[in-house]
Image (spheres, coloured by chain):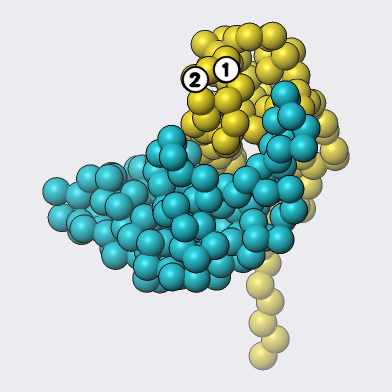
């Protein structure tokens, strides 16, 4: 005896899946921008407490890009001494106060923004009916 | 009660047990900012600590990120490179961290390397090598 299984609605489901990345991208754009802006503001505020030439603040910039399926944003500091400032110095660079400890401004701010962004992106895809698990 | 200082202490203890690393960096393993007299040392600093609240409505784990770098006042990078190699050998993939009140949830992992040469602005011939990495530690409080 022949058996047949009929499932209605698959065409609509496939069409919805094809559309999902575009929907997600549109909503994720705002989430990514919000957290990059928050990190940038936190970093600028942190730098302002150490201002000498202002070059650390001037060197900070973000760069957003979009592909068909995704949104990325990069936060960078092009000041030559930004990395040294972040991880500390051995030599006296503050006029007689000795070696400088790691500033710990950029990296903690970016790590927090990344965690917060991930939480909001998970909420976003779950609102679209997807289940997220195993996120460390 | 678990407290985060236990992770700092355990990491310092793990590094201080490495005789080969101390031979290259004889002024020891220092936290935050080195003693004024220290010249050749390993510097450890905590960059980040976060509590994962996404599971079961309570903390599922805690993540720490540390800066661990050798600091050597030399014009060549040979010893700094060796110190960084020893730091990596000691930490990356290690499950030997023993912190009061915590259980290690995953091997320690190097998440980024650090290498830079600091040049004295008043004497360009004087240089200091900084070489090491950022290390991630995932733990669970057990009491």
Q: Which residue is outermost to the bottom?
A: A1
Q: Is residue A58 visible?
A: yes
Identify the disc placed on residue A22.
none
Q: Residue at x 65, y 33 (%)?
A: A84
Quadrant where the C terminus of chain B is found in the figure = bottom left
Q: Which residue is outermost to the right?
A: A68
Secondary structure of the residue carrying numbered label 1: loop
- Chain that bears disc 1: A
Pointer 1 with pointer 2, Cβ within 8 A: yes
Packing grade of label 2 (10 A; few <14, some 14-19, many >=20) is few
Q: Which residue is drawn at 43% across and 35% down?
A: B36
User: Which chain: yellow?
Assistant: A
Residue B86: which quarter of the image? bottom right
Secondary structure of the residue carrying numbered label 2: loop
Q: Can residue A35 be seen in this view?
A: no
Q: Nearer the viewer, residue A44 or A10?
A: A44
Q: Which of A21 and B51 is in front in this view?
A: B51
Q: What is the x, y in percent for residue A89?
A: 58, 33
Q: What is the x, y in percent for residue B110?
A: 57, 58
Identify the disc placed on residue A94.
1
Residue A52: which quarter of the image? top right
User: Which chain: cyan?
Assistant: B
Residue at label 2? A97
Q: Residue at x 41, y 47 (%)?
A: B30
Q: Nearer the viewer, residue A4 or B100?
A: B100
- Chain that bears disc 2: A
Q: In this view, does A54 lie to the left or right of B32?
A: right
Packing grade of label 1 (10 A; few <14, some 14-19, many >=20) is few
Q: How far apart are marks 1 and 2 (CA)?
A: 6 Å
Q: Residue at x 68, y 67 (%)?
A: A6
């Amino acid at each position: 005896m022949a058996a047949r299984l009929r499932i209605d609605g698959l065409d609509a489901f496939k069409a919805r899946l094809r559309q999902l990345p575009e929907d997600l991208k549109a909503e994720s754009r705002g989430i990514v921008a919000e957290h990059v802006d928050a990190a940038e503001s936190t970093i600028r505020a942190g730098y302002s407490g150490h201002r000498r030439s202002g070059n650390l603040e001037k060197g900070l910039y973000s760069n957003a890009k979009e592909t068909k399926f995704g949104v990325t944003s990069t936060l960078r500091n092009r000041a030559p001494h930004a990395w040294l400032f972040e991880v500390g110095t051995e030599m006296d660079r503050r006029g007689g106060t000795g070696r400088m400890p790691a500033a710990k401004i950029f990296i903690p701010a970016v790590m927090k923004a990344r965690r917060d962004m991930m939480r909001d992106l998970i909420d976003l895809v779950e609102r679209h009916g997807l289940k997220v698990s195993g996120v460390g | 009660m678990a407290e985060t200082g236990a992770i700092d202490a355990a990491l310092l203890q793990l590094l201080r047990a490495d005789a080969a690393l101390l031979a290259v960096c004889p002024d020891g393993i220092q936290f935050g900012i080195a003693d004024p007299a220290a010249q050749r040392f390993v510097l450890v600093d905590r960059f980040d600590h976060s509590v994962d609240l996404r599971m079961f409505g309570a903390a599922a784990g805690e993540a720490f990120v540390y800066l661990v770098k050798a600091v050597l006042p030399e014009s060549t990078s040979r010893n700094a490179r060796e110190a960084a190699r020893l730091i990596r050998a000691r930490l990356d993939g290690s499950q030997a961290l023993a912190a009061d009140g915590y259980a290690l949830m995953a091997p320690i992992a190097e998440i980024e390397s650090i290498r830079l040469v600091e040049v004295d602005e008043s004497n360009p011939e004087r240089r200091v090598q900084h070489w090491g990495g950022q290390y991630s530690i995932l733990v669970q409080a057990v009491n």
